[in-house]
Image (cartoon, grey):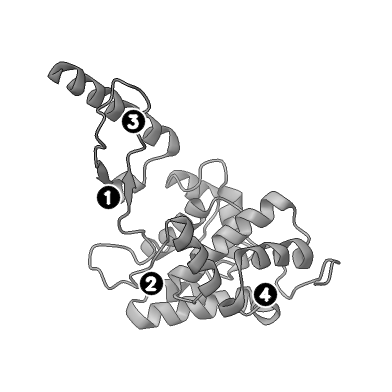
Amino acid sequence: MNNRTIQTDNPYPPPYGPTRGMIEGLQLMQRLSPAKIDENLLRANRVAPGNEYKVIGALKFLDLIDTTGRPTQKSQLLKTRGATYTLALQEILRTAYRDLFTYLPPEQATREQLYNYFITRTGIGREMAIKATRFLVALCRLAEIPLPAVSTRARRQGAPSITSTGGRKKSTSPLRKQTSTLRAPPAPSATWPSTPFPLVLAITPETAEMGEEQLVAFFRKMKAAWRRVFTEER
């Protein structure tokens, strides 16, 4: 692999912000048709607080807004549904990441190779490359672009995946993660039952919108409530 930085045909650096926030930026463009998308609009809609500029950069990289923040004609494709939406998103990604898809075919790429591409071909730093890789993998799954090597490893490690419905579900945006499950960790102390408690939490779209601090507080309350129930039963 070439170790010097290569100038790609995309004038913007690859998106390296928080994946969730950048996905929310795409969702916003699906729901709204603003004349201009800027940090103020993202802030008003609570999209990626503190990282609004990174979302703007991602939308520019994907050619969904121009240099002034005005939505491009291509952005209208995000409002389509079904197979049309999926094919449109694939085209958006293949155009934006043209150099990557030429240099490293997705059907052969591992997560490590994607990371190395961002390091050596775009010149961004380590942390940025990790985040850029994470976002690209999420986008490929949404667009149903196969990443066999990455997907196999994710399943083996039990990593969650992000999927797209392509608008086939009536009440859900095609970019919104539907449901996932979290299993409670093993009992940390002797005050918990000796037999495993198969607690499975269904994450609804509303719960999925909760921030990290809100989720931490939520799980702490559940933990305290469960300990109280067990103590009273004893």
Query: Quadrant where the N terminus lies?
Result: bottom right
Mark 4 to mark 1: distance in Å?
35 Å
Task: Reply above or below: 213 against 170.
Answer: above
Badge 3 element: loop
Q: For residue 129, which quarter of the picture? A: bottom right
Q: Amino acid under label 4?
A: Leu
Say few, some or many: other residues with alpha carbon within 10 Å of mark 4 (under 14 / 14 to 19 / 20 or more).
Answer: some
Q: In the image as oriented, which residue stretches furthest toward the right?
A: 4
User: Considering only order in the chain, which callout, 2 or 3, is on the residue closer to the N terminus?
Assistant: 2
Q: Mark 4 points at which residue?
A: 100
User: CB under 8 Å between callouts 4 and 3?
Assistant: no
User: Considering only order in the chain, which callout, 1 or 3, is on the residue closer to the N terminus?
Assistant: 3
Q: In the image as oriented, which residue stretches furthest toward the front?
A: 194
Q: Amino acid under label 2?
A: Lys
Q: Name the residue under label 2.
A: 79
Please provide percent x and percent y for residue 143. 45, 73
User: Considering only order in the chain, which callout, 3 or 4, is on the residue closer to the N terminus?
Assistant: 4
Disc number lying in front (1 or 2): 1
Residue 204, labelled with which disc? 1
Q: Name the residue under label 3.
A: 187
Q: In the image as oriented, which residue stretches furthest toward the left?
A: 233
Q: Amino acid under label 3?
A: Ala
